[in-house]
Image (cartoon, grey):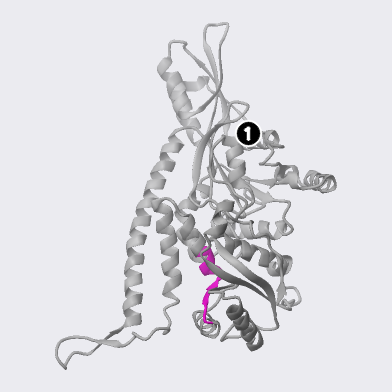
Amino acid sequence: MEPRPRDLRADRLSSANAGSETGRAIVIAPHLKRVSARAGAPRSEAATRSPQARLEEAIGLARAIDLNVVESGLVTLNVVRPATYVGKGKVDEIAGLTKSLEAGIVVMDCALSPVQQRNLEKAWSAKVVDRTGLILEIFGRRARTREGALQVEHAHLTYQKSRLVRSWTHLERQRGGFGFLGGPGETQIETDRRLIEERLARIDAELEKVKRTRKLHRDSRKRVPYPIVALVGYTNAGKSTLFNRMTQATVLSADMLFATLDPTLRALDLPHGAHIILSDTVGFISDLPTMLVAAFRATLEEVIEADVILHVRDMSHEDAQAQSHDVEQVLGELGIEAGKDERLIEVWNKIDRLDAEGRLRLFNLAERQDAERRPVLVSALSGEGLERLTAAIEERIARTRLTLDLALDPADGAGLSWLYRHAEVLTKEMREDGRLAVTVRADPAKVERIRAKFGISVKAEN
């Protein structure tokens, strides 16, 4: 293996956690030596992400659950072995490392089949965790709400159901019926699978209630004329820091992967008077388990229903482009197509980490983008560029809403109150003829209701 140095303090919530390790671990990042390059085939995403960066990310994931990473390295493969994923020589080498370093856990940064996981655990006499299992473990620790815990448990049980292999000794068949005439009963593995499926069915029912509750909340927010702005992005891209900077909130933000999991919403007044609700969502990651995307769909519907979506990117990261590709893939699964959905605004974050030359290069690159999709450069940590971001949000909201000019009777307090509840009141002033001039901005779906209530005096503007 090719060892990689690592800062022992990185990826932890605080330095106090350094003494609360959950186990000694070895992190292995296997990667294929050659990527298939058929003529005309699209370039694989794996080819755009360096193996070293994948290893660093895997170490970060391990440290996020307080594993003490005592050794890490890359393993280059010519071919994936069906039985053990890596070759026999590497299996023996890692077995020696596991024994000499007294490591109880080996993290494999790849997707292992149940048979491969069982064979490696036997060979190394240690617990083997693949990338999917590690991400699920992190999500399990980060979930704080009842909803988050249900979603994580659903994903974990779906994962475990495929891991029920014959790795224990109590899989004998139970006898069914009475006396000697009863037929053979179900095996222990069948019993476990049935229990998991029954629990999954109960969680599905509870998640359906969560989905209905969230829909009620969204419907109630729609009755209030505040547009929803959702933050999405790769994990550790700075979404929570940006959320805190914009809303003056205290959501946990740390230089670690998946520091926050449960979504948070806050009301925010923009400089020119617009009122919005800002939503911070769970971060994405490469090879995000499909069962997690399915389980968290109720949460991710906040993104689907958003009026504006801010795709926050860490532009100081060497694999920023590959991370963006991963986020776009997950958004695609939610029906949000990058480059075509007008709600998307790219936010190029962490420019404070770049030198003068790097900042100039990024600004020039942004200026060359089409005006409709031009990214906004910010530093969530220092606040630089936030005025450009808020202006871009206001412009994007105004693009999808109609501005209406109304003339009301000054004594019509009920009508004015109705406007505050169903539209965004931008200005109001008394005219020379004694009428109250009110300018509001509303969703196109509500324009007809305003027209019907206040008559033909309403004039729509773009």
Q: Which region is colored magenta?
A: 125-136
Q: Is residue 165 visible?
A: yes
x, y percentage for residue 281?
Answer: 53, 49
Compared with 146, 422 (above or below) is: above
- Can residue 185 be found in the magenta stretch? no
**Kind of residue sitting beneath label 1:** Glu
Q: Can residue 43 be seen in this view?
A: no
Q: In which quarter of the image is residue 50?
A: bottom right
Compared with 423, 48 (above or below) is: below
Compared with 105, 324 (above or below) is: above
x, y percentage for residue 454?
Answer: 46, 21
x, y percentage for residue 218?
Answer: 44, 42
Mark 1 Cα-neighbour bin, 10 Å: few <14, some 14–19, many ≥20: some
Farthest residue, direction bottom: 180
Residue found at x 55% / y 55%: 17
- Can residue 135 be found in the magenta stretch? yes
x, y percentage for residue 75?
Answer: 68, 77
Q: Nearer the viewer, residue 327 or 53?
A: 53
- Locate the C terminus by quadrant: top right
Residue found at x 31% / y 78%: 191
In this figure, which residue is indicated by the disc labeled 1? 394
